[in-house]
Image (tube, rainbow, N blue to C red):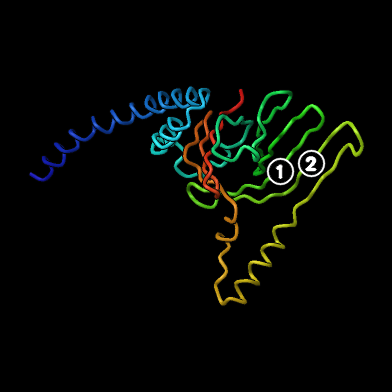
Amino acid sequence: MRSVVGISLLLLIQPVVSLAFVLAPLQRWSLKGELLKACEAKDTSKILKLAEELKPLNPTTDIRDSFNRLEGDWKLDFTTAPAQEVPEEGNGVNTYQTIEEGIIYNIINRPDRKLKIAVGAEPTRVDRVALDFRTIEASQDSFPKHVTIRFPPRNFFRFVAKAQCFLSGEAYDETKFKELAYFDLLFLDDDLRIQRNSEGNLFINSRLK
């Protein structure tokens, strides 16, 4: 009797599961299209709503297993970060992001100079990527033609964090240290990335073809 009931339940559940499996990609495709249109229209309230709706449809369930999915060139479509932190496109200004071998390069091309900011990236949780700033490179036609500013090495900050924990009697937590700066991945597929950084700002990026 139990076997018959089990089989009956399975037959009832299976079509529902199969339907959900088919509908999820279609729903993602539809919401992504709406989101990109909202980004073009700069409709902030609609962007925030659609970003939340896409979150449970995220096909990347564990970034630690799919970290290479981040690699490639990306352009920024929308952010809630303050305007002074994000150069505005136009008038000869071009910005994009390249991710390769665990390094995020933020590229800012201006008519008179080029900036390249390198940030180390390491997945620490199923949906979190820890960041550490490495270098800022500036190139221009006039003297000096190339300048590189290096941030203090991570081991220096690790030493300071360990010393602070020792003096306060707290246990040192390596993951907590790494996550002093981070972003949480809300959605990532082959051509769209939605993330929220440690300051609470939302970023929506689409992959450059």
Judging from the image, what secondary structure is the residue with disc 2 in?
Answer: strand
| Residue at the (72%, 41%) spot, across then down | 117
Residue 188 on image: x %, y %: 50, 36
Instruction: In the rendered view, tell whether residue 9 sits above or below residue 178.
Output: above
Residue 169 seen: yes
Q: Quadrant of residue 91?
A: top right
Dot 2 corresponds to which residue?
A: 137
Residue sitting nearer the eye, 186 or 68: 186
Report which residue position mark 1 lands on.
118
Mark 1 surroundings within 10 Å by alpha-carbon count, few (fewer than 14), some (14 through 19), many (20 or more): many
- Tag 2: amino acid: Glu
Give the side of residue 13 with respect to residue 178, left or right: left
Q: Residue sitting at 72 percent across and 33 percent down?
A: 108
Q: Would you place residue 21 above or below residue 177 in this image?
A: above
- In depth, the one of 4 and 132 nearer the eye is 132
Residue at point 79% right, 41% down? 137
Position of residue 7 in the picture relative to residue 87 (left or right): left
Label 1, label 2: how many angstroms apart (C-alpha)?
Answer: 8 Å
- Please identify the quarter of the rendering in which residue 209 is found: top right
Q: Residues within 10 Å of mark 2 (few under 14, many from 20)?
A: some
Is there CB contact under 8 Å for labels 1 and 2? yes
